[in-house]
C-alpha cells in the first residue's frame, strides 16, 4: 500500500488525537521489523491514533525499506489486545501494536512489538508523594507498578528512589517484544526495544526466578524478595483511575497499603475500601453462578495465549457439573447482544485481564470471569480473595486440576462407590441469593462410567480422565425447553392444512423509493412511473 501520496499524508483534522506516540515510534518499528527480516508489516492503532496512521506507515516504509505496510483498525474485541486474526488476514509477518496495551502474551507465532503512548510525569512530585507515604520506613518492601503511558519515565523514577535510600523496592519486568527470530542481533534488539525496567524472572541465569515463584500483575512479571510474602508488601501505582488499577487491586487485595499517584493531576491518594466493595460484588456473582443451570461462554478474545484451552476446559467443567454450556461469539459484549439469550442464567467472559471485569449492572444476567466460574463449580474450593486470578495461562492450569477432580467424582458415582456424594448432588441446596432451597435442573446426566463394550447412543458425550476412565453424559437442550415453556413468540404460525389454495399473484417490483404494484413494465414506462428516465 502506498502511503507517500499527498492525499494520504496531507490531511488536516479538526481534533487532534487524544493519545501521543513518542517521536521515535516509527524508527523503532522500522528497525525491529528489518532486524526480524519481515516483508509484510501490520500496524495496529486504536481509534484515537488513526489520524496518525498515514504518516506513521509512510515513515515505517521509508526507514525500513519494506513496501508492504498495512494499517489494522476497528479491532474485533478490545484495542488493547493484539489482533492476530486481522494480521493473519493481511499475511503479516511482523505486527506493531501502538497505544495502550493490556500486556497479554499473544498467540500469534510472528514477532510482535508493543509501542506505548507517552504522557509526561513530574518525577519530583511523584518522588515527594512516595517519600511522604513510605518515608517512615525506607527498608519496607514496596511493589511499584504503573500504567503503560508512563513506562518511559520508570527508569528515572527508580533511580530517584534508589538515591533516596529505598533499597527494597520491587520493580516488575515489562515485556514489549515477543517471538523475535533466533537470528536477530541481541544488541540491536536491546538498543531499540523499550527498557523493561525490572529483571526478567524467566531469563537464563536469573537469580530472582530461582529463589521465589514468578508472580504477575496484568502482564507485569516480578518475584518477591526472599522471606517476603505478598501480605508484607505495600503497593505504589503510577497512573490514573483505570481498569488496570482496578484489576491490580483485585489481584493484590492482600497488600498492606495501596497508594496511587496520578501524573495527569500530580495528586496522590491512598486506596481504601474500594477493593473490598469490588470483591464483595464479585462474591455475589460467584453465588449466582452456583445457582445457574445454563452457562454462556462468551468469547472475548482471539489473540491471547491459552484462550482456546480455557474455553475448552470451561465447557468440560460445565458439562461435568451437570449444567448446560453454550458458546457465544458476539464481538464486543453489550447488554443488547447478551440480552437476546434469555435462557442463559450466567455468562462467563473469556478475555484479557483488562477487559475481563465487566460492570454487570447494565446486563440482564451476571457476567463473571473464568476464575469465578471455577470457584462456583468446584465443590472443594472456597472464596479466597488472595487467590483471585485473571491471567488465562494460570487459569488454564487450575481448570485442568478442577476438571480431573470433578470427573473422578462423577466416575466414582457412576460405579456406585460414593452414595453420599450422589445424594448431595441430587438434593436441593440453599441459595444465598434467594434465601430459599433450589433444585438444580439436570441438563447433563452421567449414564455410565465405563465404556468397554457398550454402544454410544445419540446425544451422548464421552470423556476420558487421566486414568483412562471413560464417562458418558446425556445432554438435553436448554434453549429448546425455554422456547417451549417460556417464550411467548415462537415464530410464524404454520397452520398446516388451514390455508386455502390460491393462484400465484404478482407482487411488487421496482426500487425502494417507489414500488410498482399490479402494473406491467410497459405500462410503467408509458406513464413515467418510478424508475423511468426522462430526458
Image (cartoon, grey):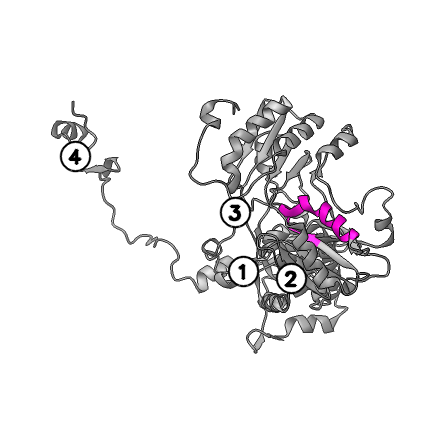
Identify the residue position indicated by label 4 in the image.
519
Marked residue nearer the N-terminal end (4 or 3): 3
| Residue 242 point in image, percent of width and height | 58, 55
Marked residue nearer the N-terminal end (4 or 1): 1
| Depth order, front residue of 103/477 | 103
Tell me which segment is drawn in magenta.
145-163
Inter-mark Cα distance, 4 to 1: 57 Å
Give the farthest residue toward the left: 527
Front position among marks 2 and 1: 1
Whether the residues at callouts 2 and 1 have beta carbons within 8 Å, the answer is no
Identify the residue position indicated by label 1 in the image.
359
| Residue 421 point in image, percent of width and height | 72, 71
Query: Magenta stretch: residue 517 in it?
Result: no
Inter-mark Cα distance, 1 to 3: 17 Å
Marked residue nearer the N-terminal end (2 or 1): 1
Inter-mark Cα distance, 2 to 1: 15 Å
Q: Is residue 359 left or right of residue 509?
A: right
Inter-mark Cα distance, 4 to 2: 64 Å
Q: Is residue 441 left or right of residue 306?
A: left
Of helix, strand and loop, which one carries label 3? loop
Query: Magenta stretch: residue 160 in it?
Result: yes
Identify the residue position indicated by label 3 in the image.
331
Marked residue nearer the N-terminal end (2 or 3): 3
Whether the residues at callouts 4 and 1 have beta carbons within 8 Å, the answer is no
Amino acid at each position: 500500500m502506498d502511503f507517500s501520496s499527498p492525499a494520504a499524508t496531507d490531511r488536516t483534522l479538526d481534533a487532534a488525537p487524544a493519545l501521543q506516540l513518542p517521536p521515535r515510534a516509527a524508527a523503532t518499528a522500522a528497525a525491529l521489523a528489518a532486524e526480524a527480516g519481515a516483508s509484510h508489516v501490520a500496524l495496529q492503532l486504536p481509534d484515537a491514533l488513526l489520524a496518525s496512521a498515514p504518516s506513521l506507515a509512510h515513515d515505517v516504509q521509508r526507514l525500513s525499506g519494506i513496501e508492504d505496510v498495512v494499517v489494522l483498525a476497528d479491532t474485533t474485541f478490545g484495542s488493547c489486545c493484539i489482533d492476530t486474526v486481522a494480521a493473519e488476514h493481511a499475511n503479516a509477518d511482523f505486527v506493531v501494536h501502538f497505544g495502550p496495551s493490556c500486556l497479554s502474551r499473544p498467540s500469534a507465532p510472528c514477532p510482535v512489538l508493543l509501542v506505548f503512548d507517552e504522557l509526561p510525569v513530574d518525577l519530583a512530585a511523584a518522588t515527594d508523594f512516595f517519600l511522604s507515604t513510605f518515608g517512615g520506613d525506607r527498608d519496607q518492601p514496596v511493589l511499584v507498578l504503573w500504567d503503560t503511558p508512563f513506562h518511559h519515565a520508570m527508569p528515572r523514577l527508580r533511580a530517584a528512589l534508589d538515591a533516596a535510600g529505598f533499597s527494597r523496592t520491587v520493580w516488575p519486568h515489562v515485556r514489549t517484544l515477543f517471538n523475535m527470530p533466533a537470528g536477530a542481533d541481541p544488541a540491536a534488539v536491546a538498543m531499540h526495544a523499550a527498557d523493561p525496567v525490572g529483571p526478567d524472572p524467566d531469563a537464563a541465569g536469573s537469580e530472582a526466578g530461582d529463589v521465589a515463584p514468578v508472580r504477575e500483575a496484568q502482564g507485569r512479571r516480578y518475584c518477591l524478595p526472599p522471606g517476603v510474602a505478598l501480605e508484607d508488601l505495600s503497593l505504589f501505582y503510577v497512573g490514573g483511575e483505570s481498569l488496570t488499577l482496578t484489576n491490580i487491586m483485585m489481584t493484590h487485595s492482600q497488600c498492606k497499603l495501596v497508594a496511587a499517584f496520578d501524573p495527569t493531576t500530580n495528586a496522590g491518594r491512598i486506596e481504601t475500601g474500594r477493593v473490598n466493595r469490588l470483591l464483595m460484588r464479585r462474591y455475589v456473582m460467584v453465588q449466582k453462578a452456583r445457582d445457574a443451570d445454563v452457562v454462556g461462554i462468551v468469547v472475548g478474545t482471539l489473540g491471547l495465549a491459552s484462550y482456546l484451552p480455557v474455553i475448552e476446559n470451561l465447557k468440560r467443567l460445565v458439562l461435568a457439573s451437570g449444567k448446560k454450556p453454550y458458546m457465544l461469539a458476539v464481538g464486543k459484549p453489550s447488554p443488547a447482544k447478551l440480552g437476546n439469550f434469555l435462557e442463559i442464567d450466567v455468562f462467563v467472559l473469556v478475555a484479557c485481564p483488562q477487559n475481563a471485569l465487566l460492570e454487570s449492572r447494565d446486563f440482564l444476567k451476571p457476567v463473571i470471569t473464568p476464575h469465578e466460574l471455577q470457584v462456583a463449580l468446584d465443590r472443594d474450593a472456597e472464596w479466597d480473595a488472595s487467590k483471585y486470578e485473571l491471567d488465562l495461562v494460570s487459569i488454564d492450569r487450575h481448570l485442568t486440576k478442577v476438571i480431573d477432580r470433578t470427573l473422578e467424582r462423577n466416575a466414582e458415582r457412576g460405579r456406585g462407590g460414593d452414595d453420599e456424594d450422589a445424594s448431595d448432588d441430587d438434593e436441593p441446596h440453599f441459595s444465598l441469593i434467594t434465601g430459599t432451597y433450589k433444585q438444580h435442573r439436570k441438563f447433563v446426566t452421567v449414564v455410565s462410567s465405563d465404556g468397554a463394550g457398550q454402544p454410544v447412543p445419540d446425544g451422548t458425550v464421552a470423556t476420558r480422565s487421566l486414568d483412562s476412565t471413560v464417562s458418558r453424559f446425556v445432554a438435553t437442550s436448554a434453549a429448546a425447553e425455554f422456547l417451549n415453556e417460556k417464550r411467548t413468540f415462537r415464530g410464524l404460525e404454520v397452520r398446516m392444512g388451514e390455508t386455502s389454495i390460491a393462484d400465484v399473484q404478482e407482487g411488487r417490483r421496482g426500487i425502494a423509493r417507489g414500488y410498482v404494484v399490479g402494473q406491467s413494465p410497459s405500462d410503467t414506462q408509458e406513464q413515467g412511473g418510478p424508475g423511468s428516465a426522462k430526458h
